Image (cartoon, rainbow, N blue to C red):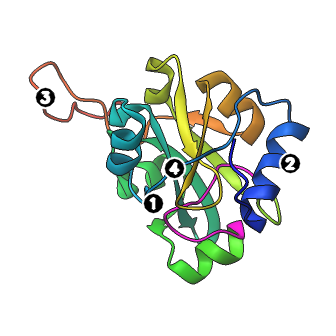
Amino acid sequence: MSDRAHPAVSIVEQTLRDRGAQGEVTWLDDAARTAALAAEALGIEVGAIANSLVFTLDGEPTLILTSGAHRVDTAWVGERLGGRLKRADAEVVKAATGQVIGGVAPVGHPEPIRTYVDEALAAYPEVWAAAGHAHTVFPTTFEELVRVTGGQVIAVEPPTDPAGSPAAASA
């Protein structure tokens, strides 16, 4: 347990407690602003990191929690969500989440934000997410992450055929 404190982290911790999450926030020695850095610091696969990425869907802030092993295909996901999905800038991220890029948590935002959770995270018995600051993370499960965020489970990139190329999309 650390004696470090940060307002955004305190809000995340309280939100996790209020929603019955089991994991405790961990302070890392070094900033983990990317999934690769977080995975390295924790000694886990990058796919077990739940990246909290803020986009806009037709101008509305939208949070997508994606496996660190994936990139969100904005055109493909936007089409499935019925709008135009694009990466939010730092100002929109801060306004929507109360947190800065590199430490955005899946919870603890000033107002509810539409949230989607990458189905690929279900492959890991434990996933880790940022906790409001680039030096903080917390463990959770896929099921708990979906529950505490109220997120909808989606694919964030098109399915691939066995040869590894994108499969023909079926309508």
- Residue 62 visible in rendering: yes
Q: Earlier in the sequence, mark 3 or mark 1?
A: 1
Q: Secondary structure at mark 4?
A: loop
In the visual, does 95 lie left or right of 15? left
Question: Are the residues at dot 3 and dot 1 in contact (C-beta closer than 8 Å)?
Answer: no
- Residue behind mark 4: 28
Camera-side residue: 72 or 36? 36
In the image, which disc is placed on residue 14? 2
| Disc 3 to disc 2, C-alpha distance | 42 Å
Q: Position of residue 108 (x, y in %)?
A: 77, 55
| Disc 4 to disc 2, C-alpha distance | 19 Å
Q: Secondary structure at mark 3?
A: loop
Camera-side residue: 13 or 48? 13
Magenta region includes residue 98: yes
Instruction: Give, as a three-letter code, the residue at label 4.
Output: Leu
Q: Position of residue 19 (x, y in %)?
A: 86, 36
| Quadrant housing the C terminus | top left
| Disc 4 to disc 1, C-alpha distance | 7 Å
Q: Earlier in the sequence, mark 4 or mark 2?
A: 2
| Quadrant housing the N terminus | top right
- Residue behind mark 1: 31
- Residue behind mark 3: 164
Question: Are the residues at dot 3 and dot 4 in contact (C-beta closer than 8 Å)?
Answer: no
Question: Are the residues at dot 4 and dot 1 in contact (C-beta closer than 8 Å)?
Answer: yes
Graded by Cα atoms within 10 Å as few (under 14), some (14 to 19) or many (20 or more), the crowding at tag 4 reads some
The region drawn magenta spans: 97-107
| Disc 2 to disc 1, C-alpha distance | 22 Å
Dividing the picture into quadrants, the one containing residue 158 is top left
- Residue 108 visible in rendering: no
